[in-house]
Amino acid sequence: MKPLTCFLVLLFASETWGLDLITEDLDELVDLEIDGFFSRSTRRNGRYQRSTSNNDDSGESVGGDDSILLHSYKIQSTITSRLANTMVQSKVENKAGHSQNLVFDVQIPKGAFIHNFTMNVNGITFTSSVKEKSAARSQYAQARARGKAAGILRSNALDMENFKAELNVPGGTKVQFEIHYQEPIRRRLSTYELIIPVQPGRLAKHLEVDIRIIEPQGIHFIHVPNSLGDQFENIATISKGEKKAHVSFKPTVVQQRKCPTCSSTAVDGNFVVTYDVNRDSKAGELEIFNGYFIHYFAPENLDPLPKNILFVIDVSGSMWGLKMKQTVEAMKTILGDLRSDDQFSVLDFNHNVRCWRDSLVQASRSQTDAAKKYIEGIHPNGGTNINDALLRAIFILNEAKNLGMLDANSVSMIVLVSDGDPTVGELKLPTIQKNVKKRIQDDISLFCLGIGFDVDYDFLKRLAHENHGAAQRIFGNQETSSQMKKFYNQVSTPLLKNLEFNYPQGLVSDITHNTFHNYFGGSEIVVAGKVDTENVQHLQSVITATASNAQLVLETLADVEGLDEFLSQDVHADPKFTERLWAYITINQLMAERNQAPTAALKRNITKRILQMSLDHHIVTPYMAMLIESPNGDELMLADSPQDRKRTCCPGALAVGQPKPESTIPSWAKPTSKTKDALSLVMGPTASAIHAVDNDPHFIINLPRQHKNICFNIDSEPGAILNLISDAKSGIVVNGQLVGAKKPLNNKLNTYFGKIGFNFESKGLKLEVSTEAITLKDSSSSTSLSWSDTGSLIRRRLLVSVKKDSKVNITVDGDLSFLVLLHRVWKKHPVNVNFLGIYVPPANNFSSNVHGLIGQFALEPDVQIYNERPGQDPGKSEATMVVKGHKLTVTRGLQKDFRLDRVFGTGVHCWFVHNNGKGFLDGHYRDYLVPTLYSYPKHP
C-alpha cells in the first residue's frame, strides 16, 4: 500500500495564460485526503487573501537542467500560547521554452489542519473559501453547467501526510503557491516541540524559516537542535525575551548545496524548535480572552503510579524483516524502562496467541531480562488473530483484579502493536470492537500502534478511543523503533488516576478537552470552554482537580486585562487563539463521539453540531468543502470528500475467511490463509517486501533499507541448474533447474524453472519441488505429495505445506521460510510449459556467509541511482546506477509478483540491470551454475 499522499492537481484553462484544461478525469486522477481544516486567514470581500511580497535574493544562480527556477521558499510560523499558525510559500518559474509541470509538495505534520491555499499564476490569484458541502457541490455543478472551467478535488477523512499541487504551465510562467495550516503544539516529556518539514526539493535563491513564539506565561527556555545536518550548524539564530522568542534560519545558496560543486540541495528534513513555559508551584495556567478560557494543566513533581501493562505484539508473517527488528529493539528499551513496582507480561500472536507469562509478573531485573530474551527469539509467521489476542490480554488483567493482585492506585493498560487487518479467527471489525468493549473494564486503557500503510488505522483509532486509549500510526522503516518508544513514553507514565476538574458553576459552559484517559500521564491536558465575561473575575478563584490518589489546588489566576494588553502590542499574535483552540478541540471531540455513537439518531445529531461549528468557525471537516477559484470566477476547483468511499471499519463491513489448516500441523508452524489469497505463513503482504524469481526467469531483488527494487534476467540453456542460495555455515542450498519452452518465440527460446531443490544438510533432508510433485527425502526414504493434494510433510522441524494446484510453503525451525508457486498452462499450448516461481523474504535468518544469485543480497549492497532521463524505449526512463564499484545504465521497468494474483500478477516497479545482471551480481552468472540439484557452487 502506498504512503498516504494528498494530490491537488490543478489544471486550468484561461485565454490570459493559455493553460490546457483537463477536468473530465480529475475525480479519477486526484485524491486529496483531508482530515480537517482550521480556518485562520484575513478575509477580504468574502475570500482569503495571500501576501504578495516578491523580494527575491539576486545571489548565485540556482537553475537546474530542467530550467525550473525556485526563486524563494519561505516558511513562517507563529505560536500564540501553544497554537501554531504556519505558512509555506514557494515561488517558482519555468524558464524553459516549453510547458512543464511545476510541483508544490508540502509535508503536513500529523494533527495539523490546512485552512487556506492560494496560488498566483502570472499575477492571477486563485483563492479559497470554505462552504457547506452541498452548497459547494451545487456551485461547482452550476459552474460546469454554464460551461465554466471546473475541476474537482477529492478528499476523505483519513490522516493526511502530504499536500501536493501540480500545475502545467507554459515557458516563462511564474507561479506562487501558498498554503496555511494550523496545529496545537503538544507538550511531550516536559517540552513543547514544533516540527516543520523543510523540503524545497532544489536550491532556492532565497530560503527562509521564520518562527515567532508568543507565550503570556513566559518562556523558560528555547532550543533549536541541528536536525538538518552538520553543515547547517550555527546557521539558525535565536533571540529570546521574557515572553517572546524569534528563530530565523536563512542558509545562503552556497550553504544549501550538498557539496561545493553540487547542483542539488542538502536542505531536506525537519526543522525542530523545542521550548517550555515558565512554571511555578501552580498545577496549571488559565488564560481568558474574548469570551473563551483555555486551561493548561501540567502539574510537576508527582511520583508515577504503578502500572499493570500487557504488551500485545503482532508476529504474523507480514511483520518479517525491518518491522520486527525495529519492534524488538523498541520493546527491549521499553521493558528496560519499567519501574520495579510495575507489573507486566507479553503476548505475541499470529494465528495463535502465546503468553510469555500467563499472569502479570513484577518488573524485576531478572523478569524484564527474561522477557527481552523471549522477544528476541520471536520469528514472525502465520496470520493475524487480533480478536483472540486482545480478549486474552483483557482476561489476564480482569483476572488479576478479581484475585486482588492489583494495587488500588495502579493503572492498567494494554498496548497493541500490529501491522495488518485480522486474517484468522473473528474477521468482522465491528464484532471485534463489540467483543473488546463487552469484556474490558472501565479502568483499563487500550492503546494501539499501527505499523505501516496496510493497517486499518481507522479501526485501531475506534478501538482505542472506545476504551479510554489512543492510537498512533507509525511507518515500517528505520524510524519505527524511535516512533514506538516516543508514543509509549507519552502514554505510559501515570501520575493521577480518575482525574476530574471542578470549575465554579454558572460561570463556564461548553467545556471540552483534548482526549485524556483514565489517568493523567505527565504531558499536558488542555481544557477549553466559554466563559461569562461579566463575572469573569469569579473564575479567577481557586479551581480544584481531584483524583483517586490526590487532590490539587490549581490557583490558576488569570490576568485578563494584562493578557489583552500584551497580545494587542504584538502584531504577530493571534487575537483569536482561545476561540480557535476551543473550536479545534471541540470538533475533534465531537468527531470521536460520532465514531462511537451507538445509534444512527445520535450520530445524526452529532453530525449537525459538527456541521454548524464548521460553518461558524470556517473549519473544513469531512462535512465541509473548499472552493478554489480565480478572481472572476471563471475557473473553479472543489476540494470535496468522495461520496462513495468504502471504509472497511464501518459497521456492517464483511470479510471472508478461509478454513483453518488441518489439525495435524503443529501449533508452532500452522500456516494460515488470508483474504484475497494473500501469502500464508511468513510472506509479507506487499510485493516490494520479497526477493523473487518467476517467469522466464525474472529476478526481483528488494532492498528494504533503501526502498528500492532491482531486477535482472538470466538467459541460460534448458537443463542448466542455477544456485540461488548457498549458505555452507547454516547447511542450506537452494538451486533451480531450467526447462525450455516448447519452441522459440520471436527467435528466442524462453526458459523457466521446472525444478527447485532444497538441501538442508544439517537436517539430512532434501526437498525437490517440480511441476509434477513435491518430494521430501532423507538417507533412507522419501515421501511425496502431488499438486492435486492439499497436505503437509513434517520432519525434524521442517514443515512443507502444500496447497492444491497453487503453492508450497517451506518453513525451517520457524526461522527460515520459502514460497514456491506453481504456474500451469494449457497442456496443448503450442509454446508455453508449466513452471515454478520462488519467493524469499529479505529478512530470512541466513548466516553472514550466504551467497548465490539471491543469497548474496541478504547483506544489502549500497545502491545509488541518479540522472534519470528519457530512455530509448518510449515510456521507459533510464538512469545511472552505482553499485559495487560499477557504474551501470539501468532502465525503469515493471515485473510481476504472482503471490497475490497467480494469473495476472501484481506489478512491481524496479530498475532493470541488463546483460544478465552484470555489475549488480558478484562475478558472472555462469559462476552460479552447479552440476546437480543439491550441489554447492564452486565459488560460494
Image: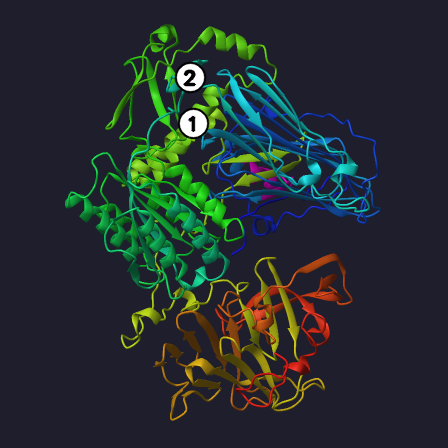
Q: Earlier in the sequence, mark 2 or mark 1?
A: 2
Q: Nearer the viewer, mark 2 or mark 1?
A: 2
Q: Which mark is residue 110?
A: none
Residue depicted at x 29% and y 42%: 342
Q: Which residue is mark 2?
A: 280
Residue 57, compared with residue 555, is above or below; it is below
State the image coordinates of residue 626 (x, y, percent, origin top left): 55, 35
Residue depicted at x 42% and y 66%: 676
- Range drawn in magenta: 139-152
State the image coordinates of residue 323 (x, y, percent, origin top left): 47, 56
State the image coordinates of residue 278 (x, y, percent, origin top left): 48, 19
225 lies left or right of 73: left
Q: Which residue is mark 1?
A: 613
Task: Please tell me which residue lies in front, 617 or 939.
Answer: 939
Q: Does 143 appear in magenta?
A: yes
Q: Does 146 appear in magenta?
A: yes
Q: Secondary structure at mark 1?
A: helix
